[in-house]
């Protein structure tokens, strides 16, 4: 096809509703894949990510605001590693000067009556042309040829089948994987691969899965599911490299194969922790994280922590780059038990001098690594706060929200100039103002409205109330747009904001939820209280609360004047409520009730109303036992309502013998 014919066909296709973006991208000088739009900073220079351009980016990638790079980066590492050369698709060198059929020849030919070899050569030829001309695989002019390939694909030998899959990846991405001709071709090839899955060995299966991965069809093909199921049945026979490659494809699939158990994956991973490179560990970690498989074996997290710490301290092996380190940190965040808090803190000691070399997103994962066990490293948080301050303009709203979460959780205010909280509020305020002027800017404010609301709910733990932003966020239309029409989808952050505003800014009624919506949210979030009924499994925090409750009843001498209930329904766990007199006597009176719409204020009579708040392990920062932001906020709100909040920390209660507990409570209630 000459340039004139191609131009006519391009105009005709666009006029009929074709994808102008695809054609524009094809004739652009910089037609790199969408996966490479946001490269990450690396610690060390590595080989260029040449193999990532082989990934066939389908329509799901065309609509992403922030493109993921970790899959292409991980695949590039595997492609550049010699141990994986026998199980990955090798790039095929197609030379245009040896193409047997031109596009014009293909259009003139009736392919229904020719041999399978000629059909194969023709499809190979037009695929090579398509790589340069960006032809549409669903164009009716190719219907004859595609139908011939579909009809004869069962006749092809394995290598020819592999070539067909590779050739298909040379075509521009189809608008949809279900588009007529494109769908008929790849689904026919899928059926042929499926029929041969049993005869292929593990290495061959991995090669073919890799071919489908380049087409971005891993989740759609029957072959990939069947092949992974077969491989997982032989988990104990896999080499270290085969296991890593398996986990990479599990990461693409985003769910574990039907034949595998989480225990088998963990058991295999544990045996390899000390035999894989840090990069290979990171790639395997992607499979665990994307399938939400949280590690339960502490030996795995211990091994990864030890190897990372050694790398940062000695440089042997070199520390992983930003993307690989982030993958490891995401796995550790959900896999490190509280007993390894000291080791994790030691790792952060070693990592702190290297933080300047890592991307902002990677640093965010460093900050979040201790969130599940309430572990904070002040030096690391200070460096990350300064880095965010310098690069705030490049942050996504999700990144800002996550940083606000971790800093307010630890009730930490780093000494930055300006304040990191002030900078975050200013940045979000500017984005909201720009969006109101130009609706094409900062679409993320509306697309990720729940992040916006969570960000504001975290700020209140630092007593920061940007009322102009809260007014926008608490608007009923914005809430409905962010969460949908189903009330059950609305997050606790909305409820937290509403009640905190009622207590601290009672005159600001325009920022409040309507009573009907508040009542529905209240019933939703208070429904968990049924877990205290007989037969329910209780957490350590729940057992602490019940133990304290029982001892307060014994101290009072009567069960009638001590209650387990919610004064502040936005907090998950209820509190122990009672009224005392000056002579160390408990009044036998009922506490004020929350009626799902109005927060109860403290009654004036008959004495001092106390709310005994139990602080479990999750309410204190690990290693130094400082109260977390949410716990301090709860105590503040109770005090604002007129109650006397009394904190019972777990680390004090657990040291007491049974006969000492009531004496401890008497001191807390009457003498402190």
Image (spheres, rainbow, N blue to C red):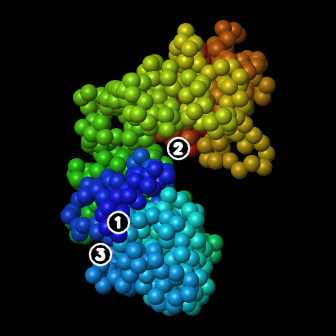
Task: Count residues near mark 2 (Cα–Cα under 10 Å), then give few for <14, some for 14-19, many for 20+.
Answer: some
Image quadrant assignment for residue 646:
top right
Q: Left or right of 5: which side holds 355? A: left
Residue in front for this viewpoint, 443 or 417: 443
Closer to the N terminus: mark 1 or mark 3? 3
Task: Count residues near mark 1 (Cα–Cα under 10 Å), then give few for <14, some for 14-19, many for 20+.
Answer: many
Q: Is residue 606 above or below residue 384?
A: above
- Estimate the x, y position of residue 164 in percent, counting from the top left: 46, 80
Q: What residue is shown at x 51% (from left), y 90% (from top)? A: 115
For the residues marked 1 and 2, what is the alpha-carbon distance in whole angstroms? 62 Å
- Give SS at disc 2: helix
Q: Which residue is mark 3?
A: 80
Q: Which mark, by number, is residue 617?
A: 2
Q: Which residue is mark 1?
A: 133
Q: Is residue 442 above or below residue 192?
A: above
Image quadrant assignment for residue 283:
bottom left
Task: Count residues near mark 3 (Cα–Cα under 10 Å), then give few for <14, some for 14-19, many for 20+.
Answer: some
Q: What residue is shown at x 75% (from left), y 40% (from top)? A: 530
């Amino acid at each position: 096809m000459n340039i004139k014919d191609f131009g006519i066909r391009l105009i005709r296709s666009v006029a009929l509703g074709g994808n102008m973006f695809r054609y524009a991208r094809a004739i652009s000088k910089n037609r790199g894949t969408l996966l490479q739009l946001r490269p990450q900073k690396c610690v060390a220079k590595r080989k260029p990510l040449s193999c990532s351009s082989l990934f066939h980016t389908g329509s799901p990638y065309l609509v992403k605001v922030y493109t993921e790079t970790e899959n292409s980066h991980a695949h590039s590492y595997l492609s550049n590693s010699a141990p994986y050369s026998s199980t990955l698709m090798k790039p095929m060198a197609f030379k245009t000067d040896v193409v047997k059929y031109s596009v014009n020849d293909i259009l003139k030919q009736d392919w229904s009556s020719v041999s399978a070899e000629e059909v194969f050569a023709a499809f190979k030829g037009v695929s090579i042309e398509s790589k340069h001309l960006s032809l549409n695989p669903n164009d009716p002019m190719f219907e004859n040829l595609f139908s011939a390939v579909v009809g004869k694909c069962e006749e092809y030998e394995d290598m020819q089948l592999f070539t067909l899959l590779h050739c298909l990846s040379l075509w521009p991405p189809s608008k949809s994987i279900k588009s007529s001709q494109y769908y008929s071709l790849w689904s026919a090839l899928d059926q042929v691969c499926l029929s041969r899955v049993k005869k292929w060995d593990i290495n061959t299966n991995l090669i073919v899965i890799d071919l489908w991965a380049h087409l971005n069809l891993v989740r759609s093909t029957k072959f990939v599911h069947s092949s992974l199921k077969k491989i997982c049945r032989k988990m104990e026979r896999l080499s270290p490299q085969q296991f890593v490659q398996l986990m990479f494809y599990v990461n693409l699939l985003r769910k574990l194969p039907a034949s595998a158990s989480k225990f088998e994956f963990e058991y295999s991973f544990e045996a390899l922790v000390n035999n894989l490179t840090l990069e290979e560990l990171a790639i395997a970690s992607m499979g665990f994280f994307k399938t939400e498989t949280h590690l339960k074996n502490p030996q795995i997290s211990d091994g990864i922590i030890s190897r990372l710490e050694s790398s940062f301290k000695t440089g042997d092996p070199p520390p992983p780059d930003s993307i690989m380190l982030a993958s490891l940190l995401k796995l550790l965040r959900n896999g490190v038990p509280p007993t390894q808090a000291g080791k994790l803190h030691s790792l952060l000691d070693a990592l702190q001098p290297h933080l300047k070399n890592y991307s902002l997103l990677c640093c965010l994962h460093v900050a979040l690594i201790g969130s599940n066990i309430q572990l904070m490293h002040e030096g690391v948080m200070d460096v990350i706060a300064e880095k965010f301050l310098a690069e705030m303009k490049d942050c996504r709203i999700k990144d800002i929200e996550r940083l606000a979460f971790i800093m307010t959780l630890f009730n930490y205010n780093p000494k930055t100039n300006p304040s990191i909280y002030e900078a975050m509020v200013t940045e979000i305020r500017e984005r909201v103002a720009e969006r109101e002027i130009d609706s094409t800017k900062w679409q993320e404010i509306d697309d990720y409205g729940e992040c916006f609301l969570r960000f504001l709910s975290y700020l209140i733990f630092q007593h920061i109330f940007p009322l102009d932003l809260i007014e926008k966020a608490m608007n009923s239309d914005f809430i409905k747009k962010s969460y949908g029409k189903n009330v059950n989808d609305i997050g606790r952050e909305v409820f937290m904001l509403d009640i905190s505003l009622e207590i601290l800014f009672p005159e600001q009624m325009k920022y409040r939820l309507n009573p009907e919506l508040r009542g529905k949210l209240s019933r939703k979030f208070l429904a968990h209280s049924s877990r205290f009924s007989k037969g329910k499994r209780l957490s350590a925090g729940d057992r602490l609360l019940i133990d304290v409750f029982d001892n307060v009843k014994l101290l009072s001498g009567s069960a009638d004047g001590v209650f387990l209930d919610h004064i502040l329904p936005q907090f998950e766990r209820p509190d122990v409520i009672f009224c005392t007199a000056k002579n160390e006597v408990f009044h036998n009176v009922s506490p004020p009730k929350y009626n799902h719409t109005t927060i109860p204020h403290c009654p004036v009579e008959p004495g001092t109303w106390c709310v005994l708040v139990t602080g479990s392990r999750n309410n204190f920062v690990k290693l130094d036992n400082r109260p977390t932001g949410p716990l301090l906020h709860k105590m503040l709100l109770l005090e604002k309502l007129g109650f006397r909040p009394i904190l019972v920390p777990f680390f004090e209660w657990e040291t007491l013998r049974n006969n000492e507990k009531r004496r401890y409570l008497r001191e807390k209630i009457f003498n402190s």
